[in-house]
Image: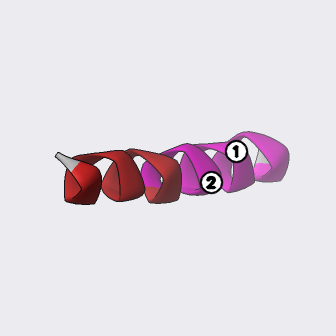
């Protein structure tokens, strides 16, 4: 379960970076 949370956080950070680029 913890691993899933960490992956979600990483994906969230990546999504934020992509949104910032747009």
Quadrant of the snapshot with the C terminus: top left
Residue at disc 1, secondary structure? helix
In the rendered image, the residue lying farthest to the right is: 3
Q: Is residue 5 magenta?
A: yes
User: Which residue occupies the foreground of this view, 22 or 5?
Assistant: 22
Q: Which residues are magenta?
A: 2-12
In the picture of the structure, the residue carrying the numbered disc 1 is 7
In the rendered image, the residue lying farthest to the left is: 22
User: Which residue occupies the foreground of this view, 6 or 17?
Assistant: 17
The 10 Å Cα crowd at callout 2, few under 14, some 14 to 19, many 20 or more, is few
Where does the image place residue 12, in percent across and percent down from the top left? 45, 51
Total label count? 2
Decide: marks 1, 2 in contact (CB < 8 A)? yes
Q: Is residue 8 magenta?
A: yes
Where does the image place residue 6, in percent across and percent down from the top left? 71, 55
Would residue 10 be found to the left or right of residue 15 on screen?
right
Q: Quadrant for residue 1, please give it.
A: top right
Query: Which circle marks residue 10 in the picture?
Result: 2
Q: Residue at x 55, y 43 (%)?
A: 11
Residue at disc 2, secondary structure? helix
Principal secondary structure, stretch drawn in magenta: helix
């Amino acid at each position: 379960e913890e691993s899933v949370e960490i992956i979600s956080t990483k994906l969230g950070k990546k999504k934020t970076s992509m949104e910032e680029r747009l």
